[in-house]
Image (cartoon, rainbow, N blue to C red):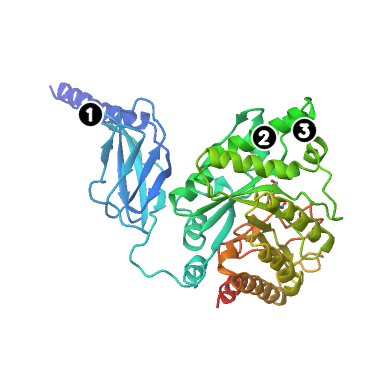
Amino acid sequence: MKIKFLLMLTSFVFFLNACSKDGNEAAANLETPVANAPKEVNDNGFKAKWNYVSQSKSYLLDVSTTENFAAFVPNYNAKEVTDLNEVVVGLTGGTQYYYRVRAKNETQISDYSNVISVVTTGSSGIPEDPTFLKVKTNKLANPFFVGMAVKASQLTGGSPYDIILKNEFSSISAEYEMKMDPISTASGVYNWTAADKIVTYGNSNGINVHGHALVWHNAVPAWLKDFSGTDAEFALEVKKYITAVVTHYAGKVKSWDVVNEAVDDNGSMRNTLFLNRMGPNYIKDCFQWARNAANAAGDTNLLLFYNDYATSTNMAKQDKVFSIVDDLKAGNLIDGLGFQMHNKYLTPTKAQIETDINRAVAKGLKIHVSELDIQVNPSNDISTFTNERRLAQKEKYKEMVQLYNALPAANKYALTIWGMRDNDSWIPYSTELNHTGNDWPLLYDSNFAVKSSHTGFLEGLD
Ligand code: 9MR
């Protein structure tokens, strides 16, 4: 009897054990979902997104203002959702939120996904920080856009990069993803993915978008380099590309660099595929096609820019750029001039920059300082960022901003910095520049901390 009882007890315990084991296994079988970066972030909400988990029937979404989910946003405590995204509403502007999800199938519930951090746009009512570049710039009598060169991969909502970008910058240029080689994969075939991400980011966050660049000899896709048709057919391909891109972004992009770097450092037209195939009138043609496409798409306000580098220190090049400008102006085709300003801690001088820019002001053009960065180690004579260079760089940034801010209101457009952190910059070890060492050309260090150059920018606005 005793043995029978013991046997029964053992099998009961075994049964219980088996049940609970089954339960655990089932839960473990339901894969953990991966939460993705949000979409459509706005002043009072965002669209939370996650990946599909096989066998799940729904998902449980948590939204919180604390990373450890100590408390939940009302209605978002394990909110059951059957889709792979949910539009979260009723939030406060300018506020940090977090979300995570679990997959569910009847009674089975997976582990928690990763946590996604997101900041709603707009203001939370907290006074804006006057040390933020765009905040101080927007308070000027004649403000201008403070721009940043961005890559689509950097635009993850809630990341330090994203927060700084939204706090401090009012314009963006694509560092490369809106050029011809990434967009045009074959004749009439376009890959918009990265470029659309950048433009949508700008449009949905109230940030101006400058298009860079429709035609550049350094961004020609292989299929066009190898194009075996006639010159006339080549020109038609360029026209088709410009028309497609300008039309695609009509009303979403405020301005385009139509042609970039068409002048050689020796002051002649640069010997490019476009010059060879289309002849010296190609610049005019490209501007005309861009204008026609914008007008046809109903965007009569699109600003068209010519963009080039090192014109302040190279008079032959400067003269040639202005002869191109005159030609374009005669056809009423150009609105602005982009001065790249990949400068150094000692050059160009203030007077050189003023001479260059004032020629464009005299022609009634908008001025875009389009790719500003300031090298402190052009001859590779320092191995760490010395205090002396830090201060020299600060002064040079200050000088540039002062000079820009002194322009007449009608000529101001944007002053764009070519990258956020020093380690994002194209300059260190650039073979293009023959820059053999490290450099620290931007406004934030590799930890997103502001540098003296950032203070220099702010002081330039005083
Ligand atoms: O900084 C850009 C770099 O990340 C790209 O690889 C490169 C090629 O697309 O272009 C760099 O930006 C250039 C800009 O478009 C035009 N002026 C010179 C810049 C530095 O090469």
Which is more toward the observer, 270 or 54? 270
Residue furthest front as drawn: 330
Which is more toward the observer, 423 or 270? 270
Q: Earlier in the sequence, mark 2 or mark 1?
A: 1
Q: Is residue 391 visible?
A: yes
Looking at the rendered image, the quarter that the N terminus falls into is top left
Q: Earlier in the sequence, mark 3 or mark 1?
A: 1
The quarter holding residue 272 reads top right
Q: Nearer the viewer, mark 3 or mark 1?
A: 3
In this view, 54 is above or below 264: above
Task: Provide the secondary structure element on which disc 1 rests.
Answer: helix
Residue drawn at x 66%, y 62% is 372
Residue 412's x, y, as percent? 58, 64
Q: Nearer the viewer, mark 3 or mark 2?
A: 2
Residue 356's x, y, as percent? 74, 66
Crowd class of label 3 (few under 14; some 14 to 19; many from 20; radius 10 Å): few
The type of residue carrying mark 2 is: Lys
Residue 99's x, y, as percent? 36, 47
**Can you identify the residue that label 1 sits on?**
16
Which is more toward the observer, 126 or 146? 146
Q: Is residue 440 visible?
A: no
The quarter holding residue 37 reads top left
> Which label is found at residue 239?
2
Task: Provide the secondary structure element on which disc 3 rests.
Answer: helix
In the picture provided, is 148 more to the left or to the right than 384? left
> Which label is found at residue 225?
3
Crowd class of label 2 (few under 14; some 14 to 19; many from 20; radius 10 Å): some
Residue drawn at x 36%, y 62% is 123
The type of residue carrying mark 1 is: Leu
The quarter holding residue 375 reads bottom right
The type of residue carrying mark 3 is: Lys
Task: Provide the secondary structure element on which disc 2 rests.
Answer: helix
